[in-house]
Image (cartoon, rainbow, N blue to C red):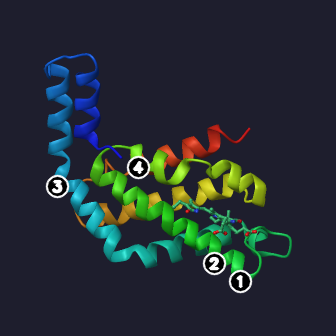
Amino acid sequence: MRDAVTSLIKNYDLTGRYLDRDAMDSLKSYFASGTARVQVAALINANAATIVKQAGLKLFEELPELIRPGGNAYTTRRYAACLRDMDYYLRYASYSLVAGDTDVLDERVLEGLRETYNSLGVPISPTVRGIQIMKDLIKEQAAAAGVDNAIVDQPFDYMTRELSEKDI
Ligand SMILES: CCC1=C(C)/C(=C/C2=NC(=C\c3[nH]c(/C=C4\NC(=O)[C@H](C)[C@H]4CC)c(C)c3CCC(=O)O)/C(CCC(=O)O)=C2C)NC1=O
């Protein structure tokens, strides 16, 4: 599992280079965004249950067929599994935000996920929508708290891109 600093060092070490101007620029931008990363992670930690619940309600309001007979989130068990998955996406997104790197998402979340979803008939595009709704909620809450929310996109967009690109 890597973060912005260990990823950068790994790349430079592979080619035996000292940290050059590009390296300094990316380190500076990572450290400059550090406070915002920690603030957003704190906000997620304080509101995780509400964020998941609200995002779930919005998702099922937009796509009610998911919770009707025949829908993948129909039955209490599958409804709960769906919200639990949303909670996984949120928790790992918060780790990735602090790390400034998507490696944790590849390693812990995305590996083998598409195959699991396909074999269980979990539809990808509504899942992607659920992840995007959580992102929007967090961006709104961060903005309302006066926190720079520019860093919020990366982990959520990465998960949705990886999930959808591979859905062929
Ligand atoms: C931390 C990394 C991690 C992830 C990401 C993960 C996902 C994950 N989601 C699953 C199931 C599931 N996932 C969903 C999710 C949904 N259905 C919908 O219609 C919605 C679009 C969506 C919610 C947004 C559902 C309903 C199931 C149960 C499917 C079934 O058993 O039939 C399963 C199958 C095993 C189980 O039910 O626990 C896995 C492994 N597990 C992990 O360990």
Amino acid type, residue under disc 1 in the picture: Thr
Q: Position of residue 109 (x, y in %)?
A: 51, 54
Amino acid type, residue under disc 3 in the picture: Thr
In the image, is residue 17 above or below residue 56? Answer: above
Using the numbered discs, state the Cα–Cα distance from disc 4 to disc 3 in whole angstroms.
20 Å
Label 1 environment density (alpha carbons within 10 Å; few <14, some 14–19, many ≥20): few
Circles 2 and 1 in contact, beta carbons < 8 Å? yes
Using the numbered discs, state the Cα–Cα distance from disc 1 to disc 4 in whole angstroms.
30 Å
Query: Does the rendering let one see residue 147?
Result: no
Circles 1 and 3 in contact, beta carbons < 8 Å? no
As helix, strand or loop, the secondary structure at mark 3 comes to: helix
Quarter of the rendering containing residue 70: bottom right
Quarter of the rendering containing residue 50: bottom left
Using the numbered discs, state the Cα–Cα distance from disc 2 to disc 1 in whole angstroms.
6 Å
In the image, is residue 36 above or below residue 158? Answer: below
Q: Position of residue 34 (x, y in %)?
A: 18, 50
The disc label shown at residue 35, or none? 3
Q: Position of residue 54 (x, y in %)?
A: 52, 75
Q: Is residue 46 left or right of residue 106?
A: left
Circle 2 residue:
80
Which of disc 3 and disc 4 is earlier in sequence?
Answer: 3
Using the numbered discs, state the Cα–Cα distance from disc 1 to disc 3 in whole angstroms.
40 Å
As helix, strand or loop, the secondary structure at mark 2 comes to: helix
